[in-house]
């Protein structure tokens, strides 16, 4: 093993022997893990009224089935924007949208499966260069049911039995604001002035009395339409309006008040008419639109179990632009949740807290993970609901006389998340130039311990608290890390490699980060904790993460490399150099046969005479088709048998030459029309 170390913006390089794998898909080892939609949830379901006047604009883009991905859309990460027409022609599709900021495009196709077959075709894949491709996953906001509680009580205003904390008419029910003691922050002069929080959700009713003047212009990505400020955009139901009220309901003595009452809400509609998710393609478009139009916080009360490179790149775009990303942990009760976007590196993952009368504790439904950051009130949360005349009106809401506004109760990590998003806005008002990791550390340093003593996977560092505002901005404890994976010669950047960081942060917390190398061969870990980590690399794209449409990727478990106990204290980059040994042995050769090694993109082709029944091809790096031929046509149908030994692992090969032909492509037992991936070998 060879390494080199540069100490100022650190760069480490390692040559590591890794097993070669066989890919069944195009250039990217297509990412096709199914999404199990265990999304962030709330008590109320999506029952908003449908705006019939808008459905005609959406019918084509929201062609859903009961599967876990859209059957007629595919995402393609491209090398050159000028190739989009060629890609569309190749896959017999139509360009739906292009996101040049992250070099990805979405195409309308007949069937995703058909596209995958096209990408497997030897001739087709030589026509264009792409970085990756993946299905467009579906995600949803699934309701979480709670028992009898505040939500079933009639709202009765009684000012004689308690002290009014906020001076709002619904103050009695605002236990969440009391829990985090936000009034002390307001008294210090922080109310969110000048901060825009993007609510990526079902849309927001900007006509609600408590949100009038609070909602700036937004975006509806499914039809590429800007939403005028102060208007109703609750196309997907009441959920987004409820989230927005917790963040930014104005302080006027009527109804309720949000955590940051002077914040501006930017609605981005990711769950459109009927509550349907617009897809990772339009979601990524919405995320980037929000960043480019001034959002400083992205509030995400949704999620799912599917890893999407497109979504990852979109959130990385936000983090790289200094935007804080907050996301709900989910309501599956699991302590090992792998929900996204919550588990993307750099995201502030939020759990839900309930009030038990004499103490605060983590809600039993709240999901956990090693990356859960903080928790916030999330049970029986009252907030704004769309007005009766709005498209997202929910019949379970109620109206109060003071301002004729509609309100309702919901529970879930969906409701905890906006408490944190609003609090982040207060911190950004105090520290407008803070990096996302610094804001996260402020939240964690000021949190009140709940649940199990100390940092744990259910409550994180604890429940957010006002004392974060009085804390000094940390100047260390966070970093950006790039993990690059190349071939043995450093020439080929390998995509779709799984990279995990498992270790101990600078706060002695056991953490786990996960990412994949993008189309440029780099796995990005933005705004993560400093600490000591084992770097575990496996891939590209393991079989267990690639099933669903078909078993299209074959990989052995031995394709994992470890780099143990590495200390990261500053922005760094690591380069891992994969290498491979490959030898092909034929059963019988006469000395006249030849081998053709053709690169997958068709740019190179090498013919080698077989002077013996064995040939070493360890020097090769890249993706190749292996072809076997005779100098003249065979008289009879002929089967060719061989064995390829990859780093000591034997795989049987075969090919079939029909009478009158000279050439066959060699395949293994896992399928035809597939290429082989080699990394080269250095002494």
Image: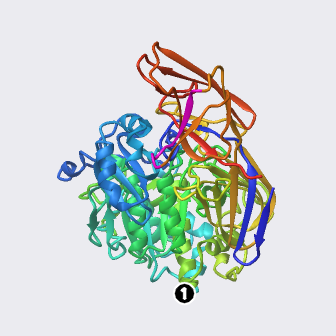
Q: What quarter of the picture does the N terminus occupy?
A: bottom right
Left or right position of 508 against 609: right
Q: How is the image coloured?
A: rainbow
Q: Is residue 30 magenta?
A: no
SS category of the residue bearing label 1: loop
Q: Which residue position holds label 1?
A: 189
Q: Residues within 10 Å of mark 1 (few under 14, many from 20)?
A: few
Q: Is residue 64 above or below residue 272?
A: above
Q: Is residue 620 above or below residue 234?
A: above
Residue 68 in view (yes/no): no
Residue 300: percent from the left, percent from the top?
49, 59
Quadrant hosting residue 609: top right
Q: Which residues are magenta?
A: 592-603
**Which residue of the protein is positioned furthest toward the bottom in this rendering?**
189
Image coordinates of residue 139 in percent, x first then y, are 44, 46
The residue closer to the viewer here, 51 or 259, is 51
Q: Let me know if residue 433 appears in the view.
A: yes
Count of labels in the image = 1
């Amino acid at each position: 093993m060879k390494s080199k170390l540069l100490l100022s913006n650190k760069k480490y390089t390692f040559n590591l022997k890794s097993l070669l794998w066989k890919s069944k898909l195009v250039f990217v080892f297509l990412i096709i893990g199914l999404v199990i939609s265990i999304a962030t949830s709330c008590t109320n379901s999506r029952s908003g009224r449908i705006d019939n006047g808008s459905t005609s604009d959406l019918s084509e883009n929201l062609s859903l089935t009961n599967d876990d991905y859209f059957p007629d859309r595919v995402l393609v990460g491209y090398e050159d924007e000028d190739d989009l027409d060629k890609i569309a022609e190749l896959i017999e599709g139509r360009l739906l949208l292009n996101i040049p900021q992250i070099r990805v495009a979405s195409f309308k196709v007949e069937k995703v499966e058909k596209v995958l077959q096209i990408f497997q075709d030897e001739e087709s894949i030589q026509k264009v260069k792409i970085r990756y491709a993946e299905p467009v996953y579906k995600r949803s906001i699934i309701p979480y049911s709670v028992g009898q509680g505040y939500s079933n009580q009639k709202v009765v205003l009684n000012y004689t039995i308690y002290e009014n904390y906020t001076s709002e008419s619904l103050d009695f029910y605002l236990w969440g604001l009391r829990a985090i003691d936000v009034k002390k922050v307001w008294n210090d002069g922080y109310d969110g002035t000048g901060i825009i929080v993007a609510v990526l959700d079902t849309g927001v009713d900007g006509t609600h009395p408590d949100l009038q003047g609070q909602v700036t212009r937004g975006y509806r990505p499914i039809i590429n339409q800007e939403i005028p400020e102060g208007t109703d955009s609750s196309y997907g139901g009441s959920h987004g309006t409820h989230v927005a009220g917790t963040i930014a309901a104005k302080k006027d003595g009527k109804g309720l008040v949000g955590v940051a009452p002077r914040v501006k809400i930017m609605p981005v509609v990711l769950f459109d008419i009927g509550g349907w998710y617009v897809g990772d393609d339009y979601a990524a478009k919405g995320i980037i639109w929000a960043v480019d139009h001034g959002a400083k916080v992205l509030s995400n009360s949704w999620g799912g179990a599917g890893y999407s490179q497109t979504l990852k790149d979109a959130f990385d775009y936000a983090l790289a632009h200094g935007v804080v990303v907050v996301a709900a942990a989910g309501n599956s009760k699991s302590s090992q949740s792998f929900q996204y976007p919550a588990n993307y590196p750099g995201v502030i993952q939020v759990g839900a807290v309930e009030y038990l009368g004499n103490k605060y504790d983590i809600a039993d439904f709240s999901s956990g993970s090693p990356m859960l950051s903080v928790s916030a009130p999330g049970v029986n949360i009252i907030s704004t609901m769309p007005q009766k005349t709005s498209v997202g009106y929910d019949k379970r809401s109620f109206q109060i006389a003071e301002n004729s506004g509609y309100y309702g109760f919901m529970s879930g990590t969906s409701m905890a998340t906006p408490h944190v998003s609003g609090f982040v806005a207060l911190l950004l008002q105090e520290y407008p130039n803070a990096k996302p990791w610094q804001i996260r550390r402020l939240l964690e340093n000021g949190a009140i311990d709940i649940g199990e003593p100390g940092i744990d996977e259910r409550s994180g560092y604890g429940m957010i608290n006002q004392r974060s505002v009085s804390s000094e901005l940390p100047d260390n404890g966070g970093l950006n890390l790039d993990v690059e994976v190349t071939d043995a010669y450093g020439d080929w950047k390998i995509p779709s490699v799984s990279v995990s960081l498992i270790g101990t942060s600078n706060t002695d917390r056991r953490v786990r980060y996960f990412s994949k190398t993008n189309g440029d061969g780099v796995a990005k870990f933005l705004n993560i904790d400093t600490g000591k980590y084992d770097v575990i690399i496996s891939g590209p794209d393991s079989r267990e993460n690639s099933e669903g449409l078909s078993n299209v990727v074959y990989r052995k478990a031995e394709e994992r490399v470890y780099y143990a106990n590495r200390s990261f204290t500053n922005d760094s980059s690591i380069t891992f150099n994969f290498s491979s040994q490959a030898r092909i042995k034929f059963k019988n050769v006469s000395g006249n046969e030849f081998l053709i090694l053709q690169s997958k993109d068709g740019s190179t082709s090498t013919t080698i005479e077989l002077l013996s029944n064995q040939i070493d091809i360890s020097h090769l790096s890249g993706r190749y088709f292996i072809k076997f031929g005779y100098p003249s046509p065979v008289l009879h149908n002929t089967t060719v048998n061989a064995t390829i030994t990859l780093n000591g692992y034997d795989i049987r090969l075969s090919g079939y030459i029909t009478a009158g032909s000279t050439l066959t492509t060699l395949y293994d037992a896992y399928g035809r029309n597939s290429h082989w991936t080699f990394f080269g070998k250095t002494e």
